[in-house]
Amino acid sequence: MREKIIGIDLGTTFSCVAVLEGGSPTVITNSEGERITPSVVAFTETGERLVGRLARRQAITNPTNTISSIKRQMGTDHRVKIHADGKVTEYSPEQISAMILQKLKQDAEAHLGGKVSKAVITVPAYFNDSQRQATKDAGTIAGLEVMRIINEPTAAALAYGLDKRHEQTILVYDLGGGTFDVSILEIGDGVFDVLATDGDTRLGGDDFDQRVMDWLRDEFRKDTGIDLSQDASAMQRLRDAAESAKKELSSRMETTINLPYITADAAGPKHLEKKVTRAKFESMIDDYLQRTISIVDATLREAGKTADTIHQVVLVGGSTRIPKVQELVGQRIPGKINREINPDEVVAAGAAIQGGVLAGEVDEIVLLDVTPLTLSIETLGGVATPLIERNTTIPTEKTKTFTTADDNQPAVEIHVVQGERKMASDNKALGKFQLTGLPPAPRGIPQIDVTFNIDADGILHVTAKDKATEKTSSITIKDSSHLDSNEIERMRKEASEHAEEDRRKAEHAEVRNRADQLTYSAEKAMSDLGGKVDGAKRSEIEDRIRALRAKLDQNASTEELKRGMDDLSKSAQDVVSKAYEQTQGPQPSSDSGGASRGNGSVPEDGGDYIDAEYDKK
Amino acid sequence: MLPEETRQDPMADAAAAQPDGAQVVEVDLRAQLAAKDDEVRSLVDRLKRLQAEFENYRKRILRDLAAAEERTSDREIVAFLPLYDNLARAFSAYARDADVGAFVSGTERIFGQFAQLLDQKGVRRIAAMGEPFDPSLHEALLSIHSQKEKNVILEEFSPGYVRGDRTLQPSTVTVSQGPAQEEKEEQ
């Protein structure tokens, strides 16, 4: 196997390393089990070197020999003086950065199980030549051949595959822990051109934590008269609580910061408990966020662009998880916002992709499509039963086994649909065909294998085969995977908008199927074993069968059907279950979701047997 | 293939020199080429299917991993629910009887149950007070001069825990800087 080229995001506060595996970037977990590594280096008394989380934990005991944010010094004559082992040693920023790179290299080697000697390293778009050279030198010192230095915003755009689009203008909004960068890129023929870049090297998520912390401290002083500022332990607890509250408010509208026994006075222990709403948090950091937007405006002006000429926005950095950030950026720039990839990892992922391209790995990978939407067939009650889920990489083949819905059903109709809706009729119809000539058999007995085979060109071949007679019938559907992206988006949106309604419809269909199956089984049981049942019981069961049948015919509600089924099952339990076992075998236990399952067929081979049924047409 | 083109082919020239064998060689080569074409097509198809399968496998693994993580969390949460329930019982008993002694002894039992559970899960408390500071186990919040040796832990603010060889949470501590300069000189 050829040697891997790793991708490294060498950040001011955190660094991240990734590698291309099987054509997709994988973030490498460090030896502490974390996906990002603090960019901190320390030298202990004894000259031992610590990098990352451990260096950070001891910073306060060893402030002069702990170095953070060395990235700010790259390309300068700055020298770090380390007092250790009784002597003073000077290190250049390159050397300190090399120590971080070395740890990332070791973590990558542990992950890949082999030597790593080549890397792509990212730098801010505003880095000048000497800063870039310094970064390259840091790599060399760390024992890495730096195959390429690429811009962080370019890497982020690569991670989203934006290099594969036609000419586009991209704005990268990067709000990290301690720095904020905006870049405007233009892409043409796979080449990125940085039109403008701006930012604030002292603005980031840490400032937001500080605001929450200050607020908590002030509130506590207002409530109790106690100032926590001088209490290191309390301040640490405030900092941790502020950070987790900030994170929680990205997914919730409100959170409670609860710090019992935060301190004590003569009257006894004091507890801190504060509710923070998302709106309150947003107001605390509003000036910072407005500042980022005015920097966006300045960058647009510098690039000679207007907001509506930006095609794509890429969000980078942990702080872009804050909903208000997304909202403000979205209001300012009407273009498409890309934020699906973890914003802490997207730069490293892009660097790994660049590494894969340079290693020739990307050429070896055949570019494969995915099915943009789920491909299903219609089963009993109009339910769409999926065979190939959306986002499945093609070519692929899936087979499921189905059966009939009625006794002596001579044919089944295969109705192929595409989309995420639960009911077939709400999805896009792709084609229909019949498999005829089924030999007479009770419902649930025939086994019909339906195979969906999508080839690399996205052409879908659907085949139905009756296992007993080996009779087959098939259809070929072209362009099942090449849908207009707007149409795909619309169909997905519709599915999520109608999720609840669809779930109800599908449940109704499923309950109908079960009710139908129950009346069928009960009728069969009565005709087979009815003689052994005493008269009163017998007429009770028959009444209830009739009642449930009537409800089915009147298309009664799900609840009413369930009640009818309960009644019938209660009175006919023993009789029916006996008969049911004799005619049908045990209930299949698998899969309660979606389609018309949970009744009918016997998995004979214990294999991939799905007992959805066809509607008789 | 047109005859004009075949003539430019050295093989065809060779065949032309031996008119009898020419047709046979050409037909044979064409058949071989067609067979190779078929082979390449089928290999490429196999490659694509294998790669697609790998991709789908990866997607499934990621899904399974996320699901497994969820289930693991579920199991852990379930293990801790009795503690929560018992605390609720303690509070409702206290609300009923206002018996402080009973409340304290009840809560102590719950605390014991909690400690037992952590112990069963292999969670161990990190030793801190008086120990040498170790950044793999401790996090320094303060560093002060003291009569104690440099780097010795003077105070533990919050306890830390390990499980196996992994630090779940470092203890937060105050670390000694050793005696202040003047004190040293006085000695």
Image (spheres, coloured by chain):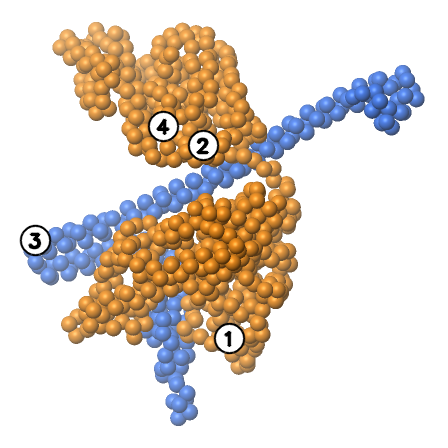
Residue A238 at x, y percent in the picture: 30, 65
Q: CA distance from mark 2 to mark 4?
A: 18 Å
> Mark 3 = which residue?
B96
Rendered view: A105 above or below B54? below
Residue type, numbered disc 1: Thr
The kind of residue tagged 4 is Lys
Q: Which residue is mark 1?
A: A46
Of tags 2 and 1, the one toward the viewer is 2
Label at residue A487: 2
Q: Which chain is blue?
A: B
Cα separation between marks 2 and 3: 63 Å
Q: Image height check: is A127 above or below A529?
A: below
Are the two marked residues, 3 and 4, in contact with CB atoms closer than 8 angstroms? no
Q: Which chain is orange?
A: A
Nearer to us: label 2 or label 3: 2
Q: Are marks 2 and 4 in contact (CB under 8 Å)?
A: no
Q: For the residues tagged 2 and 3, is the chain the same?
A: no
Q: Nearer the viewer, mark 1 or mark 4?
A: 4
